[in-house]
């Protein structure tokens, strides 16, 4: 690619302001797309530097960049880091501000005194805030965690549904949507919800070679907790243990605590102050292990996390990839282990039964759960199963040579030999340990 004056500006900013020698390929493609004025969706794995894809253009675009984030704690952290590093003048508008702080932030936005403005989707939806943004010169609207827009996604949030209407009210400014995971259905839904049929997708793939995936089959709850304890004891560094219920999280926490492990806990039934305190204990290294429900998730970035253990199957592979992907963000090797006890699937089926989702969504969620179960039961490459699920052709292998099934392939019965070519779909029956499991479609 020929070097343009704009590329020279980007490279100069990269070293002088951000202290980075070179952009990664995915970052370069996203930034080029944004600076060319295109609406863009960046699907990039955790730890690949998505934030830089808007922070750098924000320094070059003529106008303010509005960043929509679902988490107040995350936007507070990002705004402070931008200011402290001298990268950009940043403001945040959310419910955590005092009235005086909020008025100061709103005034700075009105006077175009900020490069980057962080807000929640709820704030963006208010007519008063929209009126303020209309007066300002908005160059770019960034939608962080964009999969939350889609009702087909694993983390749908109703407030995100109003973003499309807000963009219309603001005169259809340029959009950059960011997410770590998105299936083809989710991408199509994001296009539709934002009314951006020509939204350019830059998908760098989900593959992270430093993550070693494995599934441990267990036959009863006691064995599951014993294996969990062995894994925690046998793995150096910090880690996260995910539980599907508060009850299971408490049991795991009590077991680890009684065993002398440095552990804390996080779930939705704790008071906000206690959740924040426990999160800080883990983030600052005062506790080695965090036991949590999925309430501990979005926006959590502890890059030196060496292991993630799931005590039960999550509802779908999107959730599993997101949660397990909190390991190894520093690029160093990390282990992602699912403890699979077949009776645990009843819990997710119970959650499905209690769901009030429309019939079409309910059926899709049921299929996603079956694919999650199929992943747990399959004897084929874990990474290949994940890549196929997300429709990711990169890196194009059949075997990652790192997961449990690649390192210790399960035996295939003679009757199933002809089905091995269907392995990446999880269709072949496999023998896992001493338990004969029927594979379920996972592709």
Image (cartoon, rainbow, N blue to C red):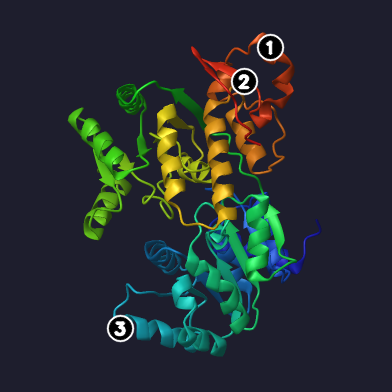
Residue under numbered circle 2: 429
Residue under numbered circle 3: 99
Count the numbered circles shown: 3
Task: Report the side of 2 relative to 433 (left or right).
Answer: right
Extreme top residue here?
Answer: 414
Instruction: Find numbered disc 1 in the image and state the secondary structure of the residue it sits on.
Output: helix
Instruction: Find numbered disc 2 in the image and state the secondary structure of the residue it sits on.
Output: loop
Q: What residue is shown at x 54% (from left), y 37% (from top)?
A: 372
Q: Which of marks 2 and 3 is in front?
A: 2
Q: How far apart are marks 2 and 3 (CA)?
A: 62 Å
Front residue of this view, candidates 27 and 3: 27
Q: Where is residue 337 in the image (x, y as percent from the top left)?
A: 45, 30
Residue under numbered circle 1: 415
Q: What residue is shown at x 51% (from left), y 89% (from top)?
A: 131
Q: How far apart are marks 1 and 3 (CA)?
A: 71 Å
Q: What residue is shown at x 49% (from left), y 66% (from top)?
A: 158
Q: Where is residue 60 in the image (x, y as percent from the top left)?
A: 63, 73
Work out whether 270 lies above or below 339: below
Q: What residue is shown at x 59% (from left), y 21% (from top)?
A: 406
**Image quadrant where one finds the N terminus:** bottom right
Q: Callout 1: 10 Å neighbours few (<14), some, many (20+)?
A: few
Residue 66 visible, this angle: yes
Instruction: Find numbered disc 3 in the image and state the secondary structure of the residue it sits on.
Output: helix
- Point out the tag, 1 or 3, that comes first from the N-terminus: 3
């Amino acid at each position: 690619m020929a070097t343009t004056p704009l590329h020279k500006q980007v490279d100069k900013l990269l070293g002088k302001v951000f202290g980075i020698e070179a952009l990664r390929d995915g970052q370069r493609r996203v930034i080029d797309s944004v600076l060319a004025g295109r609406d863009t969706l960046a699907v990039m794995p955790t730890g690949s530097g998505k934030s830089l894809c808007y922070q750098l253009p924000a320094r070059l675009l003529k106008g303010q960049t509005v960043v929509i984030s679902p988490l107040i704690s995350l936007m507070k952290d990002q705004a402070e880091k931008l200011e402290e590093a001298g990268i950009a003048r940043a403001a945040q508008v959310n419910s955590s501000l005092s009235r005086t702080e909020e008025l100061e932030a709103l005034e700075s936005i009105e006077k175009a005194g900020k490069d980057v403005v962080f807000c929640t989707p709820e704030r963006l939806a208010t007519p008063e805030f929209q009126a303020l943004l209309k007066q300002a010169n908005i160059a770019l609207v960034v939608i962080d965690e964009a999969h939350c827009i889609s009702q087909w996604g694993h983390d749908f949030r109703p407030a995100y549904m109003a973003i499309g209407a807000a963009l219309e009210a603001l005169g259809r400014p340029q959009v950059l949507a960011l997410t770590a995971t998105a299936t083809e259905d989710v991408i199509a839904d994001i296009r539709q919800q934002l009314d951006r049929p020509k939204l350019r997708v830059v998908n760098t793939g989900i593959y992270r070679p430093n993550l070693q995936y494995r599934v441990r089959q267990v036959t009863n709850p006691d064995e599951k907790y014993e294996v969990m304890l062995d894994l925690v004891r046998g793995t150096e560094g910090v880690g996260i243990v995910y539980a599907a219920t508060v009850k299971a999280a408490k049991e795991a926490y009590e077991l680890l605590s009684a065993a002398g492990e440095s552990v804390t806990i996080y779930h939705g039934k704790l008071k906000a102050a206690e959740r924040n305190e426990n999160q800080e204990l883990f983030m600052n290294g005062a506790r080695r292990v965090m036991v949590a429900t999925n309430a501990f998730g979005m926006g959590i970035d502890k890059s030196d996390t060496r292991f993630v253990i799931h005590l039960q199957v999550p509802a779908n592979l999107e959730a599993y990839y997101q949660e397990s992907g909190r390991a190894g963000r520093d690029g160093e090797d990390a282990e992602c282990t699912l403890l699979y006890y077949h009776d645990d699937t009843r819990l997710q089926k119970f959650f499905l039964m209690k769901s009030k989702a429309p019939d079409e969504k309910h059926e899709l969620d049921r299929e996603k759960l079956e694919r999650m179960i199929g992943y747990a039961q399959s004897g084929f490459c874990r990474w290949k199963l994940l890549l196929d699920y997300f429709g990711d052709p990169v890196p194009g292998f059949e075997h990652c040579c790192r997961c449990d099934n690649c390192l210790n392939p399960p035996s295939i019965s003679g009757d199933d030999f002809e089905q091995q070519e269907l392995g990446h779909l999880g269709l072949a029956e496999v023998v896992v340990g001493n338990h004969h499991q029927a594979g379920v479609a996972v592709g």
